Image (tube, rainbow, N blue to C red):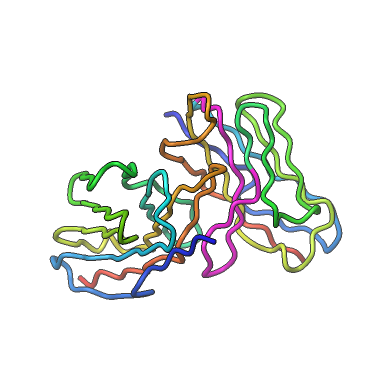
Amino acid sequence: DAMVIQNPRYQVTQFGKPVTLSCSQTLNHNVMYWYQQKSSQAPKLLFHYYDKDFNNEADTPDNFQSRRPNTSFCFLDIRSPGLGDAAMYLCATSREVGRARISYNEQFFGPGTRLTVL
Amino acid sequence: KQEVTQIPAALSVPEGENLVLNCSFTDSAIYNLQWFRQDPGKGLTSLLLIQSSQREQTSGRLNASLDKSSGRSTLYIAASQPGDSATYLCAVKEGNNRLAFGKGNQVVVIP
């Protein structure tokens, strides 16, 4: 089945120790998103790739970086995790067309990675 | 700044009753609205997508309406079942491909 896969499902790291979360998709979608969801809060968009174009949200801390080496994979790097970065990290994809580069279509989410910072 | 509100935050209903979940948003300049389901500790499952030009979408027991001018959407779940217990999230698509989410309606269906 076509899907969005996130690894690992649970990640424990130490304060200040870099960590990388992985997302892959078999949907062949051209847009990939990273969201942060803290407990009992709404998911918040960190950034997204439209094809190879990286789009950062204005309020995303510099501590968060992303890489998309190919269509199928996208990584979230947290350079120096703080206690406040403990959250569920959700990857999503959508297939979009059009010159306006605006996404009208449904977003499909992976199961998430729960990050704990000790 | 777009604000999405879902009321009530939590509700319980007896099995078999119809569920009505409300979502409101402050800026009507949206591209679409999507309803999601989230089980505890899990990711989001897309339920319905309504484009800004549409009034409603239906899938099985689920029906979602959209009144863009008044900034409202309603999700109806007919004949609720215990398996419908989850958190339901509403999200509107803004410019820059951003989905602005509400905090969700936490639903418990009592057998």
Q: Residue at x 79, y 59 (%)?
A: A81
Quadrant containing the N terminus of chain A is top left
Where is residue B26? Give x, y as percent.
43, 63
Pick the residue in front: B14 or B61: B61
Quadrant containing the C terminus of chain A is bottom right
Query: Along the horizontal axis of the image, is B22 left or right of A58?
Result: left
Pick the residue in front: B39 or B10: B10
Where is residue B47? Give x, y as percent.
33, 47
The image quarter containing residue A10 is bottom right
Q: Is residue A9 above or below residue A102?
A: below
Q: Is residue B70 magenta?
A: no
Q: How many marks?
A: 0
Query: Along the horizontal axis of the image, is B78 left or right of B37?
Result: left
**Region in magenta:** A28-47
Where is residue A16? Give x, y as percent.
86, 60
Query: Along the horizontal axis of the image, is B52 left or right of B29?
Result: left
Q: Residue at x 46, y 47 (%)?
A: B93
The image quarter containing residue A43 is bottom right
Query: Along the horizontal axis of the image, is A72 left or right of B110?
Result: right
Q: Residue at x 34, y 44 (%)?
A: B52
Where is residue B108? Give x, y as percent.
30, 70
Q: Is residue A34 magenta?
A: yes
Pick the residue in front: A33 or A23: A33
